[in-house]
Amino acid sequence: MEEARNYHMSSKEFRDWGYKTIDWIAEYLEKVEQFPVLSQVKPGEIRAKLPDTPPQQGESFETILKDLDKIIVPGLTHWQSPNFFAFFPGNISAPSILGELISAGLGVQGMLWATSPACTELETHVVDWLVEMLGLPKQFHSSGRGGGVIQDSASSATLVALLAARERATADISQLVAYTSTQAHSAVEKGVKIAGISLDNLRFIEVDDSYAMSPEALKQCIVADINAGLTPFYIAATVGTTSSNAIDPIEQLGAIAKEYKIWLHVDGAMSGTAAICPEFRWIHQGLELADSYCFNPHKWMMTNFDCSCFYVQDSSQLIHALSIMPEFLKNQATESGKVIDYRDWQIPLGRRFRSLKLWFVIRHYGIEGLQHYVRKHVALAQEFANWVESDPDFELVVNPPLNLVCFRHQGSDQINQAILDTLNASGKLYLTSTKLGQKLTLRMSIGQATTERVNIEQAWQLIRKAANCSE
Ligand SMILES: *Cc1c(COP(=O)(O)O)cnc(C)c1O
């Protein structure tokens, strides 16, 4: 008979390797600026370095850690580099990493209050704190009919808002019409597909010169749909579009939503964090007219992915859309009606203890620390925009409201594409592009935790040099 064996790491080994793993992360972050920001590997290159078959016998943790440097790091695009200006900020921080680690170490499931009361109550408390910190409307605070929850992503938030709106609507699903702008995130279209709404019933509303949704165009479209016997049920507005950071006029869109009794969801995934500074709260003007709202601390609030805060003004509508009560989940706490069971606020059943990292971040930085970085990033972006404007070879495509600068070389799309390709192949920075007014536009997104003025200066020099070579 085989002798009873224990394959686990001992507590001592766990401590030793745990300390070494933290050392590894700290060293990675110390030297992250030295790597090419955009990974330069070819498709298949990483897999070719991995063994064909998994190990029959376990390996030493030392070998495993070594393979990180050998195999994994070369295949990374370094989102934490101070020279990462692509897409959107995906910043992290030491307290957040540690909160994530502790969440992993606790390994609790928070689907019901009863499955770990602290997991639910800390989450409610922290999302309530954020209502205060961002100056969000009181209707999103858990003390009333509404409240917040942490979703994995803004895409999920968009979808569950849509499901609650579908539930609230009384017309047949084939008659329901959803509205968003031509600049909205693709998550809206994906949500509509998943929710079983025909894509023929999703309207992409025209935008104004700043790429914000036009309330007049929205209203016309709604009226036309009603006249055609259809039922408008959902508007997805954006505070800070991904493409160009456009801020939809929530107040005017909200008035239309109220007039026609349409659910208004506001997506502030990337830019909502700015509202931690009172001077940027104008982005949320009219938010009290929204039925739901979300923003991602996992973008610009020093919190590791995944962490998207989602708020509703009336949680009963959301719960009505998503609640299930199989026999195996029945428990006294739920039946007492005194607790929140967050499984009814999201699509999956299981849920991680995500609020720990957010709690650590808020407590470590304080409101003041978080404000400091938002202000710094916005100031750097505005300075960069001034450099662009005063250079005759370049133009600003829109005035940057916050920390995303959309600009282009005055020449053709080919020149702009060549500039982008040269820069990204250099590994010295990473920029992405978009199309605005049919023209290829470069996007400089400034929001990484460790980005300093020197990184912006260096980027501008490299951009001008790439332009000189491409002309
Ligand atoms: C980034 C972004 C999203 C998608 O966010 P996920 O959390 O990755 O789903 C949606 N909307 C806007 C405006 C965004 O900036």
Image (cartoon, helix red, strand yellow):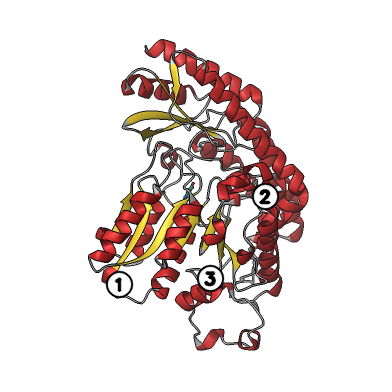
Using the numbered discs, state the Cα–Cα distance from disc 2 to disc 1 in whole angstroms: 43 Å
Q: Position of residue 38 (x, y in %)?
A: 48, 32
Other residues around mark 2 within 10 Å, as few (<14) / some (14–19) / many (≥20): many
Residue 447 left/right relative to 235: right
Instruction: Point out residue 447 in the picture as x, y percentages from the top left corner.
Output: 59, 37
Q: CA distance from mark 3 to mark 2?
A: 25 Å
Q: Element at badge 3?
A: helix
Between tags 3 and 2, which lies in front?
Answer: 3
Residue of label 2: 97
Whether residue 151 is visible: no
Q: Residue at x 31, y 32 (%)?
A: 438
Amino acid type for the residue under numbered disc 2: Ile
Picture residue at 58% right of the left edge, 37% below the top: 69
Say if disc 1 is inside 8 Å of ligand 1: no
Q: Amino acid at mark 3?
A: Trp
Which residue carries the number 1 mark? 173
